[in-house]
Amino acid sequence: MNILECLKKTKNASYGLALLSEAKRNVILTSLAGSLLKTCDKTLDANAKDLANIDKHNPMYDRLLLNESRIKAIAEDVKNVANLPSPLSKRLEHKVMPNGLNIEKISVPLGVIGIIYEARPNVTIDAFALCFKSGNAVVLKGGKEAYHSNLIFVEIIQKCLKEHDVDVNSVYLFPPSREETHILLQATGLVDVCIPRGSQSLIDFVRQNAKIPVIETGAGIVHTYFDASGDLKKGRDIINNAKTRRVSVCNALDCLLIHKERINDLYSLVEPLQNHNVEIFADVKSYEALKANYNLELLHTAKAEDFGREFLSYKLAVKVVDSIDEAMQHIIKHTSSHSEAIITEDIKSANSFIEKVDAAVVYVNASTAFTDGGQFGMGAEIGISTQKLHARGPMGLEALTSYKWVVHGNGQVRG
């Protein structure tokens, strides 16, 4: 069967999904969580085939890696989604007009959601769970790096759907090669929206080739600015956590900006990074401040292209700025509008940063590692939107719905 025929089946399946009761959706998701745990060994065998084809030093390796604890966490996320309130059939607005028309605005599924992602097999389950809970069918276009892992996950999902008499076409795994992506991006009338998750090049490719609506997510060029009034201990902990907690994710720190008045504290701020062998790409002033103490094998002179890079590895750019205004101008120039942070004890500086920095999430005295649907109380997320239309920041269930107007009358006609 060709791809378009498969997409038509998924579109047809989406109509039935919207009619499922919340209770049945929750039962199926809970059942899926249990199935993931029961089939853990089988999943790890499939994942091993994918891992065998990628260099362990490649930043994608960590994204691709599954183990027992990660599968348990994925299953727990599915259960959490099952326990979340349904975003469907909510009355978002209600009014009675002078002519007696009773008008309601009601939340409804988007329909068929296409997810394009790279070496993150957990997205396969997270995306299905969120789409299913919100009444949407899902088309999954994972990267070839994770094909065996994605395939086994979809087999588990479809088996669970079949056991509960739900159309297995509610989820469709696209072929892994990039050539077929054009078919998905141009499937007007069959796919209602596409959400790309991955590198900037992937997102650019989707944006440039899509005929269907796109919600941009994923790419994170993340800055943290240490202000003149910044607290040293807070700064050490925040910078270390934002950079090293998990380097391959989009909320990981890429560039540290530090006020010139605090340059003598720079080494103290980045000292914990040496324990993780973090390479620093420093501008001239920060290089001079670090060369006496920071491991010289890990310290490099920054090039212009090192600022504005999403490293996705144990690498960090560092720059000294003369003022908070210079820091904000640097961020405005290089940001991907994902997550940006300031470390300061000055309320005026904090407020200025909040007002002027245009990002989906802006932090004051906290690690950018918190940009995550679970950490925001949403359960598993579909992605981090960096655009402004429809959804922005971590996208939970509500972001996967639209609405329709329902009008009740009693014979009214318009003059």
Image: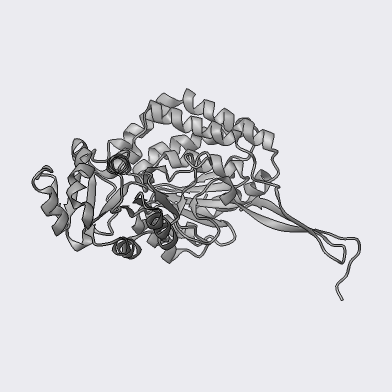
Q: Which colour scheme is used?
A: one colour
Q: Could you tell whether 277 is left or right of 200 in the image?
A: left
Residue at image position (34%, 39%) is: 64
Residue 123 on image: x %, y %: 45, 42
- Above-or-below relation of 229 to 379: below
Residue 78 on image: x %, y %: 53, 34
Is residue 318 in view?
no
Residue 407 on image: x %, y %: 80, 59
**Residue sitting nearer the eye, 290 or 344:** 344
**Image quadrant assignment for residue 59:** top left
Is residue 314 in view?
yes
* Residue at the bottom extreme of this rendering: 415
The total number of labels drawn is 0
Quarter placement of the C terminus: bottom right
Residue at image position (63%, 48%) is: 14
**Residue sitting nearer the eye, 83 or 339:** 339
Residue 174 on image: x %, y %: 46, 48
* Residue at the right extreme of this rendering: 411
